Amino acid sequence: TRKCPQQQHTSFHSSPSTCPQQQLLYCPRLCCMMKGPNGYGFNLHSDKAKPGQYVRSVDLDSQAAKAGLRAQDRVVEVNGLNIEGKKHSEVVAIIKVSEEEARLLVVDPETDDYFKKLGLTPTEAHLRGPMPQPLTNGSQRTQKKLGDESDPFLESGLNLSPTAAEAKEKVQAKRRNKRAPPMDWNKKHEIFSNF
């Protein structure tokens, strides 16, 4: 898995020369946090009227608070995996799969509106490069479609981010491992008849 940068709670922007000051207001944030004794310290919720996964609350002095996570942030990616369109339970499973650390790409409500007006989904690429700008009348600039960027590790057969199905399977496998081993009926009868 990819590790978080050394600065764990800073919004990562490109340099001011490539990301004008007004656009710094609309940069997504990468919140990297290590799991504490009481978890990460935030509550995630979804609303049927408003698609997406949102941070409901952040505990004071929690790992999430130290990472810069704020209430009302919309979660776009978890550990590099886009979670838009996923069910709440699937997103929770993806977060739980990485037992020690979570990287959440989030946007505040204003940044979310900005990207929606542009018809774009924020990605980690928006943390480093120039921010997208609204098209002006007559502009024929083409936009790169999401998913066109190839993962350099994929070509070598290394897939670093699990799919939702893989994450779900891992969680279910842990549950299966916690069950008592299967036992034949005669053995059960023998055990319980001794009581």
Image (spheres, rainbow, N blue to C red):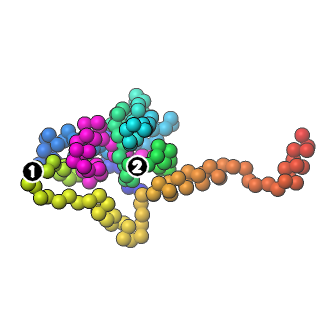
Q: Which mark is residue 137?
A: 1
Q: Secondary structure beneath disc 1? A: loop
| Type of amino acid under label 1 | Asn
Q: Which mark is residue 85?
A: 2
Residue 124 magenta-drawn? Answer: yes
Q: What residue is at 60 percent from the left and 54 percent from the top? A: 173
In front here: 146 or 35? 146
For the residue carrying disc 2, how many other residues have a C-alpha within 10 Å: few (<14), some (14-19), or many (20+)?
few
| Label 2 or label 1, whichever comes before in sequence order | 2
**Which residue is drawn at the image coordinates 17% and 43% (left, top)?**
23
Question: 186 or 138: which is nearer to us?
Answer: 138
Question: Where residue 64 appears, x then y in whole percent?
Answer: 39, 37
Q: Residues under labels 2 and 1: Cα distance?
A: 31 Å
Q: Is residue 96 left or right of residue 128?
A: right
Q: In terms of image quadrants, where is residue 108?
A: top left
Query: Residue at 28% of width from left, 41% of height from top?
Result: 112
Q: Nearer the viewer, mark 2 or mark 1?
A: 1
Q: Horizontally, is 96 left or right of 179 in the view? A: left
Quadrant in which the C terminus is drawn: top right
Q: Position of residue 74 (x, y in %)?
A: 35, 40
Residue type at tag 2: Gly
Q: Position of residue 59 (x, y in %)?
A: 42, 30
Q: Which residues are magenta?
A: 99-126
